[in-house]
Image (cartoon, grey):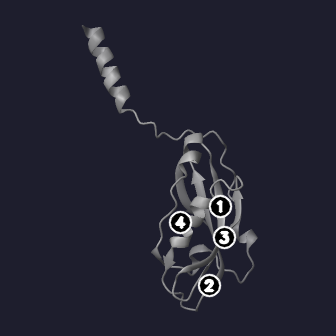
Amino acid sequence: MKFSCLCLIVLILSGCATKDVFKPKSQYPPDPWVKGYSNPDDCLGGEKLAARRFDLPAYPRRSFNSGRQGWTIIRLDVSESGDTENVDVERSVPDGLFDSASLSAVRKWQFEPPKDGALKKCRVLLRYRAGEVTLGG
């Protein structure tokens, strides 16, 4: 009797288990030095930007399921009205794996209108690590 109750409990609990557990299968590559990719007159991330709409990308399902990790450096301009323009991947590791998710999200970002007019060549680091996406500096 005890054995059958124990088996029943194990079966119930195993049915509640989630398959969405991130298990890294690749090493997280060291973060790049974003300022090393820029010129002194370029805009770097949050220094001059105040976000109005700022949703981080979703971790790509295929990368999540395969345990892949990495990052992208996104280059963008911010118009006088605060919209993103000329969004492009400057560098990514591993090449191309997180580009699409990063570009989709950043193109939707909106900022408060910059006080000194449009900003050119802003750079943002997006980290895809341990199943989560974070913003780097």
Distance of label 3 from label 2 (alpha carbons): 15 Å
Q: Name the element at disc 3.
A: strand
Query: Who comes first in sequence, dot 3 or dot 4?
Result: 3
Query: Who comes first in sequence, dot 2 or dot 1?
Result: 1
Distance of label 4 from label 2 (alpha carbons): 19 Å
Distance of label 3 from label 4 (alpha carbons): 12 Å
Task: Please tell me which residue is depicted at 68% across the width and 57% down the height of the picture.
Answer: 31
Depth check, front residue: 31 or 19: 19
Residue ID for mark 1: 72
Please provide percent x and percent y for residue 41. Answer: 71, 84
Please provide percent x and percent y for residue 116. Answer: 58, 92
Distance of label 2 from label 1 (alpha carbons): 20 Å
Specify the quadrant that holds the N terminus. Answer: top left
Which disc number belongs to residue 88? 3
* Residue 84 sits above or below residue 56 on the image: below
Query: Residues at badges 3 and 2 in contact (C-beta under 8 Å)?
Result: no
Query: Who comes first in sequence, dot 1 or dot 3?
Result: 1
Judge depth for marks 4 and 2 and give the one in front. 4
Query: Who comes first in sequence, dot 1 or dot 4?
Result: 1
Distance of label 1 from label 3 (alpha carbons): 10 Å
Task: Please tell me which residue is depicted at 54% across the width and 91% down the height of the picture.
Answer: 115
Residue ID for mark 2: 119
Residue ID for mark 4: 105
Task: Please tell me which residue is depicted at 67% across the width and 44% down the height of the picture.
Answer: 27
Q: Name the element at disc 4.
A: helix
Specify the quadrant that holds the C terminus. Answer: bottom right
Q: Name the element at disc 1.
A: strand
